[in-house]
Amino acid sequence: MRTIRLAMAQINPTVGALQRNAEKILRFTERAERQGCDLVVFPELALTGYPPEDLLLKPRFIKDNIDCLLKLSRRIQGITAVIGFVDRQEEIYNAAAVVHRGSVAAVYHKMFLPNYGVFDEERYFQAGRTPLNFTLGDVTVGVGICEDIWYPEGPARVQALAGAEVIVNLNASPYYFGKVRLREEMLVTRAMDNDVIIAYNNAVGGQDELVFDGNGMVVDQEGRVVVRAKAFSEDLVTVDLDLEGVARTRLHDTRRRKEILEAEYGGVREVTLHPVRGKKKRPIARRPSVKTMDRLEEVWSALVLGTRDYVRKNGFKHCVIGLSGGVDSSLVAAVATEALGPKNITGVFMPSVHSSRESREDAEELARSLGIEFLTIPIDSVFDSYLNGLKAVFRDLPSDVTEENIQARIRGNILMAISNKFGHLVLTTGNKSEMSVGYATLYGDMAGGFAVIKDVPKMMVYELSSYVNARAGRPLIPERVLVKPPSAELRPDQTDQDTLPPYEVLDPILKAYVEEDRSLDEIVAMGYPKRLVKRVITMVDRSEYKRRQAPPGIKITPRAFGKDRRMPITNGYESR
């Protein structure tokens, strides 16, 4: 039988940390070699981390990454490795190096460059023009990078017609809920259409707003998922691929024979490599099956991983959170505790005259359940000093949102003072629904270094909070928090619905407008009152300036604010 033992190294690189990334690549390569693998594949731009953004405009960074690759290559002798890096010729390329017997034997340049959503690859890279196949002994392998595999008529088709039996696809594919299923459906289709095995290896880890979820997989020529990598975790997946199965499938595919006659695949670059002769292979240990996650488990895992990596990769150890006794701050505290451990989290309750006894009790109970440090710092005396200082200016004008915002800004100042004094990172607690309509205070509850649930709609906040309790088997988040009306508690008897539509109405309107770009009339046709929809759209449009000043937060929906959705602040267009 013709087989090849393949390893997919699903690693968590750090953008810009070339030497650390190289050492991680080497460690995983050595593990794969010890397991008798012929070939090990790493994610897209594994050496530089993804996305390197404007680091790519620094010539020294490009040179350092190439030098690092060459040094790394000399240390890889007993296995063939495919490693993502940045190549430079006349221009720079998103590239994959085929490393064999201590040197770079071939380089592939990504042919399809995504330039939508969070991707800006055309800003930096030139597109490649030539597909690459390499032969390792009697097995032909095609190399692709991320976007290349999404196109039915892309390089995978040409490579397969030119003889590739396995396509290794290097990825840095960011997560949003629903994407895992979409990827698998695409890969199944591509493998069956081309009678080829596809090894789809994805990066894992958090990078600013993005989370890479891993979830790599190998799909055989009949569309069966042979093996899955873990979700939201580093992994080394090893698998013996049966190439005779590919040959048998192709013998029965009359369509393929006609396509070969019609195809123009002479442009495929082909490189022949002599296999590294190693020890006799031992059988691969049976790998436990990786269960697929449901929607809430996926989102929870993305929030935890994104928070952990943002904090740790930026050199922080401890986080501070303003606890209000509400659901948003409770969920953020639960995520942070899971990500960093309870000893690294401080919750601060900052009551005013408007804070209820229930909120104090709920905040205390949450901190006790999570095992985190809990501080109480009242703000009444500070608030009174503000009012006294402004009394002459305001001339006894009636109290309004101004005084509400002062309270929020006092709380923001207290959290930032703790941050400055102790070196803690402030995690903000606003959700996507609030950020959409501007129901947040600049330099108040928006003040901080990282916005954990910035892309989580309010109704999903409740779903995730219930998930947290179900997962723990006990109410980590107090049950009362999940049933009481949400309130900022900045004036007597205040609830969010004094200002906003009910969240079960607001969230679908926001999804339609923000994520789907539906017009006013289209949203009204969904069954919502025109006056209400118009009001929501106006709130969204007028709040762009606030969102520009918010800290980065984790993307979990198909379209997040920031890199995904880029609207002008000064904007005279009236949505209709």
Image (cartoon, grey):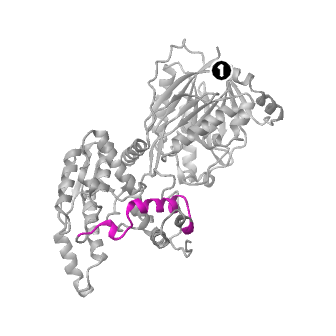
Does any portion of residue 506 appear in the rendered image?
yes
Highlighted magenta segment, given as a residue range: 493-521
Decide: few, some or many residues near mark 1? Use Cα within 10 Å; few <14, some 14-19, many ≥20: some
Residue matched to label 1: 245
Which residue is at 47% across, 62% downward?
Answer: 509
Of the pair 502 and 415, the residue shown nearer to us: 502
Horizontal side of 135 relative to 8 (left or right) equals right
Which residue is at 61% across, 34% downward?
Answer: 188
Which residue is at 81% across, 37% downward?
Answer: 264
Does any portion of residue 452 appear in the rendered image?
no
Amino acid type indicated by mark 1: Gly
Horizontal side of 572 relative to 306 (left or right) equals right
Picture quadrant of residue 6: top right
**508 falls in the magenta region:** yes
Q: Which residue lies furthest to the front in this view?
A: 527
In the rendered image, residue 284, in percent from the top left (x then y), is placed at 49, 18
Q: Quadrant of the C terminus?
A: bottom right
Q: Main secondary structure of the magenta part?
A: helix
